Each structure stands twice: as C-alpha cells, then as structure tokens.
Amino acid sequence: MSNSIRFACVTDPTKRHAFFMASPAAGFDQLLAAYERDEELSAEPFEFTDPQIVSETEAWIAAAARESDRPPLVMVGSIENGHWVNWNLADIPRPPVPAY
C-alpha cells in the first residue's frame, strides 16, 4: 500500500450505497472526521490492493493538488446495491465488487 494516499469507504446506514474516496495520507484523518459529523454517512479506512489502482489514484491526487491549494479528495468509484455504478479510473478495469 502506498504511503502517500489512503482510501476510505463511505456508506449510507443501509450499506446499499458505497463511495470509495481517496485523499493524501496527511489529510486522511480529516476525511474520516468529516464523516463522523454526518448522521447519514459513515467512513472507514479501505484498501485497494491492485497496484494499478493505487498508482493511478496517486497520480490523480498529485494532479489535483497541483490545481488547487485545497487538500485534494477524489472519488475512485461507487457501488449501489452490490454493483459498480461509477468507476473514475478509465484506463483500469473495474475490480470485482469489494466487501465493505
């Protein structure tokens, strides 16, 4: 796993909807804390183990950091009712739906 970025799985109370977010490792605790204040969503650390997903996300986070002075946060993909409905890493095939 990369030391420069971290992934989180954000879910609704029913866990039918899940969003996979990434942020720089330095801001990861802030990401989790933001969702702790939201009664409708929760966030937990998550790991994508595919090196292509990690490296592509690292590059995306780095590009986002260069474009803004705000800490970058990207949504890698989302799942609804056990199926991918969004995958934002166009050059990498969607992985199997992870357990969350």
Image (cartoon, rainbow, N blue to C red):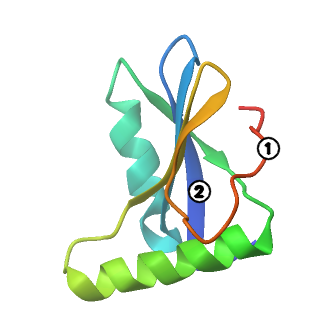
Upstream in sequence: badge 2 or badge 1? 2
Above or below, comparing residue 39 to residue 28 in the picture = above
Above or below, comparing residue 99 to residue 22 in the picture = above
Foreground label between 2 and 1: 1
Q: Residue furthest top?
A: 14
Q: Secondary structure at mark 2?
A: strand
Q: Which residue is mark 2?
A: 7
* Amino acid of disc 2: Phe
Q: Which residue is mark 1?
A: 96
Q: Please give the name of the residue rendered at 33% of the width and 26% of the height, measured from the top-left corner.
A: 38
Q: Is residue 82 visible?
A: yes
Percent of width and height locating residue 4? 58, 79
How crowded pointer 2 is (Cα within 10 Å; few <14, some 14-19, many 20+) is rated as many
Q: Please give the name of the residue rendered at 79% of the width and 43% of the height, measured from the top-left corner.
A: 96
Quadrant of the image occupied by residue 100: top right
Above or below, comparing residue 76 to residue 53 in the picture = above
Q: CA distance from mark 2 to mark 1?
A: 17 Å
Q: Secondary structure at mark 1?
A: loop
